Every structure is written in structure tokens, then in C-alpha cells.
Image (cartoon, grey):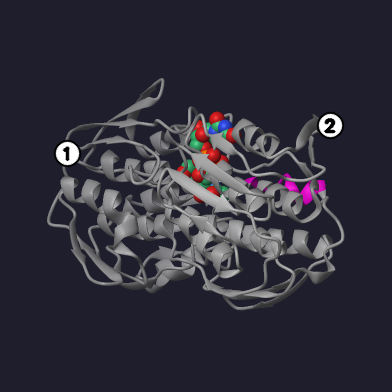
Amino acid sequence: MINGGIPLKGTVEISGAKNSAVAILPAALLADTPSTIDNLPEISDIELLSKMIEYLGGKTIKKEHEIIIDPKGINSFCPPHELASQMRASYYLIGALLSRFNEAAIAMPGGCNIGVRPIDQHIKGFEALGAKTTIEHGIIKVKADKLVGNHIYFDVVSVGATINLMLAACKAEGTTILENCAKEPHVVDVANFLNAMGANIKGAGTDMIKIVGVDKLHGCKHTVIPDQIEAGTYMVAAAATHGDVTIKGIIPKHLESIIAKMSEMGVIIEEYDEDLRVTTAGRLKRVDIKTQPYPGFPTDMQQLMAVLLALADGVSMITENVYEGRFKYLDELKKMGVNAKVEGRTAVIEGVEKITGAPLKATDLRAGAAMIIAGLAANGVTEVKNIYHIDRGYEAIEKKLQKLGADIKRVK
Ligand code: EPZ
């Protein structure tokens, strides 16, 4: 429940990156000895992954924002389907278990309903390393006599496929070259983690990655990078409520495209080494947004920015180039008086002076966060349901917003 119209003020600390942590926990299973991972976000996707690792025979010791993973006891390559199908990143267990056992059997991944989301590039990669893949009864089975390095060109830039093939190739025989790779900060963070365990990966963060297989990996200590999209979420919340918020513990480089687009709208962003201060001076201006893989404008910020555009002066266009079904949330926002229409992969948003509170249903993770921000900027009360979507990727969002002065509460 949100009572809107209050400018957010104060400081918010950014948590570790979801899309990095959900790959690093499976990656820890490639080692023979324990790893300690800190700056871990307290989100439900991490709880789910820890449960799956325990089910596979691994030991986990959980402390606040930290986990120790001991992979020595791992004795299964088949996590419970009802758990694996609840989240997208369970597909990283395929790369990890294939590398450990030359075999894996995992339920087709779940995750946000924002488009078709095939995994053909993952499978293409595994098969190029010598694995055979079958999909039956919703289960992906991948098996290899042995994994041998190869040259793999991705037909589409995919975060998941790039990371999964790094996991599968780092103990394969010989050298693997990955081309047309994703360059997101979390791809680099996972490569750094693997190299700290003794892998030999070069070029992460560029569109070509070279992996020289090694026999063994050992545990290590790793600090997860700050969450680029969580930081972007609080930047939008500050601007949408015309507040004054300092966002702490970020890496400005990771936010360049977001800072550029918001500055174009007239948002005032002061950059410091690890912090940003966000304020505004009057009504924001319209802009056009085209989502692209990193370092382009992140698709995960698209829904959040739509709330700013809905209150901006003029007509804006959002072109969603990564997913074909990521505008569903607009039907919910229209209940608040948002003026938007969708044509194919483009949404046309005509800015309005004000929006009003309404009962909304979160349709996925970022859509849910966008609805909370719309509620903070609206006149009156907004109710956001299906918040389990939001808890998957945001740590204690209502507590962090309350600390910034928001009138928001979680109602059972
Ligand atoms: C990751 O998803 C993120 N999820 C997504 O964040 C994010 O939207 C996406 O990358 C793009 O940045 C995680 O990291 C867990 P992709 P992923 O493979 O790996 C197509 C959030 O809100 N494709 O980069 O699934 C695909 O359909 C979530 O935190 C294929 O065609 O995304 C999409 O159109 C939502 N075949 C495009 O590529 C494949 O085998 C990019 O997908 C793989 C992908």
C-alpha cells in the first residue's frame, strides 16, 4: 500500500547485483573446496538457489549478505523441478553441473514473463563442446563423454548463454572462443569469480572471450558487484517524486546509459566516486528510449523509465529491442491515468500533469517496481499486488523507501 505525493529524501544503500549473484552461486559448484561470497542481495531468488544447491548435496552456511558454499558433497546433477522451474537463472546449474559431472538434467527455466525467452544459444554452445541435448517432459538433459573446447559464435547477444558457456568451458579440454558475447557488468563479475577460482578466462566485457580449460578449480572469496538496475530504480524513484536522494555504493560506469538518458530529461545527477545524488528542477522533458544490450540502455530499466515519461512534458517513444513482450505493465499503469499506446515493439507515451492511485497487479519483477514508483508519484493510494515478483530481485524495497520518507507498507 502506497500513499503517494511525498518527495523522497535521504540516502539509500545499493545491494549486491541479482544477475551476478544468481550465476556466481552455481559457479561455486565447479570448485573442489568452499567459496565465500559476500555483498549478496537478500532476495528470494538467492534463497531458492541455496535450497537447490543443498538438494544437490552441497553445504551452504548463510549469514546476512554472505554465503559459504561447500561443493564437496555434491552428488546429484538434477535439482528439484518444482524449484528450478520457478526462476530463469536455474539454467546456470546446467553449465555448472555439466562441467562437474559431464551431465545435467534441469527443468526448463521459469522467470519473468516478458517474451518467448528461448535457450537455443545455450544448447548450441553445449553441443559445440561435445554434449548431446534432449528436451523431454519439460526437462533439459545434457550429457557428454567429455567436454572439448571449440569456437562458438552466438547468433544473438545473450547474457545467459555467454555466462553458461563460460561455466561449461572453463574445465573443458583445450581452448574455447566465444564470439558476439554479452558485455554486461555481471558477465565480467562472474568471469572474475571463475578466474579467482583458478580458471583462465580472458576478454570478459568485450564481444570475444577466450577460455583455456584447466583441470581443477578451488574455492575463493568474492564480493558481488553493486546492482546496476536496483540503483537505476532508486534514481527513477527520486526523480519521479521530485526528491533529493543520494544513492550509495554504486559503480558509476555501469550506470552511464541510465545517467545519460535521465540527464536528457532534465534530471540533475551529481556523480561521485561510489555515489550519485539525484534531484530535479521542475517538470521533466520527453525523450525517446531504445533498449540494447550493454553498454546500450538496459531493457530492465525500460518499465521504470516509462513512469518518468508518463509524467514528462511531451510525447516519448520506447523501442524495446531485446524482448518482444515487455509492455504488459502499461495496461496496469493506464488505470492511474497514464496515456500510452503500444505498436509492436514501440510504446508511445504522452506525458500527463498527474496520475492517481489505483489497485495494480505486478506482472513481473521490474513491472512491479515501476508500479511502486508510479504509486509514490501519484495522488492518493495505490495498492500493488503479486509482490512476490518484486521480492525476487529487490532487497527490502519498502524498508529502503520508508527510510527515504515514503508512505509505503507491506500488507499481509
Ligand atoms: C538476463 O536474462 C537477465 N536475467 C534479464 O534480467 C535481462 O533482461 C536480460 O539478461 C537482458 O539483459 C538474468 O541475468 C537472470 P538474454 P537472459 O539471454 O539471460 C534472446 C531482470 O529483470 N535469446 O540476454 O535470459 C532472448 O529471448 C531480468 O533482472 C535467444 O533468442 O537474457 C532475448 O530476446 C529480466 N536465445 C535476448 O536474446 C537464447 O538462447 C536476450 O536474452 C538466449 C537468449
How many other residues sit within 10 Å of disc 1, few (<14), some (14-19) or many (≥20)? some
Give x and y (percent) for residue 15. 47, 68
Q: Which residues are magenta?
A: 81-88
Majority secondary structure of the magenta segment?
helix
Q: Secondary structure at mark 2?
A: loop
Q: Secondary structure at mark 1?
A: loop
- Circle 1 residue: 313
Q: CA distance from mark 1 to mark 2?
A: 51 Å
Give x and y (percent) for residue 89. 63, 49
- Circle 2 residue: 137
- State yes or no: residue 84 in magenta: yes
Whether residue 181 is visible here, answered yes or no, is yes
Q: Is residue 303 left or right of residue 139?
A: left
Give x and y (percent) for residue 190. 54, 59
Quarter of the rendering containing residue 239: bottom left
Quarter of the rendering containing residue 131: top right
Quadrant of the frame with the C terminus: bottom right
